[in-house]
Amino acid sequence: MPRTMTADGVGIAYQVRGEGAAPLVLLAGQSNNHRWWDAVRDDFHGERSTITFDYRGTGESDKPDVPYSTELFALDVIAVLDALSIGRADVYGTSMGGRVAQQLAARHPDRVRALVLGCTSPGGPHAVERTNEVRRSLVRTGSGAARRALLELMYTPGWLAAHPGPYRTLGDPGMPAHAQRRHLAASNRHDAWQILPDISAPTLVVHGTDDLLNPAANAPLLADRIPGARLHMIPGARHAYFEEYRALASPLVLDFLTSVPQP
């Protein structure tokens, strides 16, 4: 698997798939590696080549026990783009990946042609936080209780009944404990509110109406804060809308990206 080295000396593993000429960077959720996208990645091929990477702390990338941040993850994206000699790319980030995408688009506007933010939030005091009930469900004791709670936040009961797994959105099982803590801290510290108006790339915000893990009320906050952003809410969808509702979500994203004129 190809790797590149970041400015601070961390090896980052990345993956390139598809035959399309236009590059699309796909950014996964917290404590997940590139497998997060396995179920839907092929939806973009043909029109797009897709680029993923394993966040530091996950997959085949290095796992230093040092502070992580969404700003730092954004610099890791740039290291991958530089390794591939790609100046600008379209970027689609979901969950924590959407937070990384905000940092990338606001702080490095020359590297982002078009932006899609899925099931994410601005972070900080302006964000709508998940409820205490949801937090408690994720730390339940007992065999498999927290995992089941996370599954039910990701997918609807009907979809879970019809799809017994494997599930690629529940975290990288090979992550060391220190990396899990570092990812959680990076996501929790994210606050892009002040820089969101600096995003100049055409932006689409997508969110499921029934998302409780990252509350749906964050979507209009982002769309209102980013100049000219479009908003699309998917009725009935939970956090992993991009997988369960892929028949709607993937064409929606592709249509948006296609509608953005080439420079």
Image (spheres, rainbow, N blue to C red):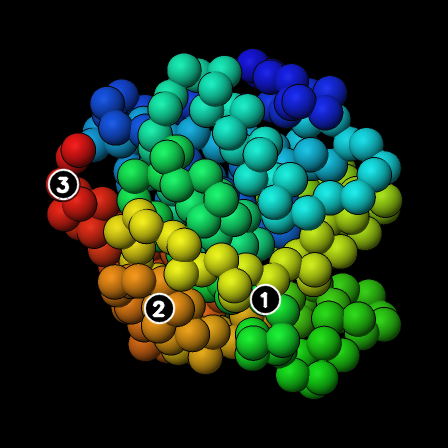
Q: Which quarter shows the C terminus? A: top left
Q: Which residue was labeled with disc 1?
A: 123
- The image position of residue 255, as x and y in percent, is 17, 49
Residue 107 coordinates in the image, percent (x, y): 49, 44
Q: Residues within 10 Å of mark 1 (few under 14, many from 20)?
A: some
Separation of residues labelled 3 and 2 (CA atoms): 20 Å
SS for callout 1: loop
- The residue nearer to you, when weighing 121 against 21, is 121
134, above or below 249, in the image: below
- Which quadrant of the figure has residue 25? top left
Q: What is the tally of numbered marks visible in this picture?
A: 3
Mark number, residue 56: none
Q: Of the two numbered discs 3 and 2 on the same chain, state the one appearing first in sequence.
A: 2
Amino acid carrying mark 3 in the image:
Pro
In this figure, which residue is indicated by the disc labeled 3? 261
Q: Which residue is mark 2?
A: 223
Viewed as shown, does residue 113 lie left or right of 261?
right
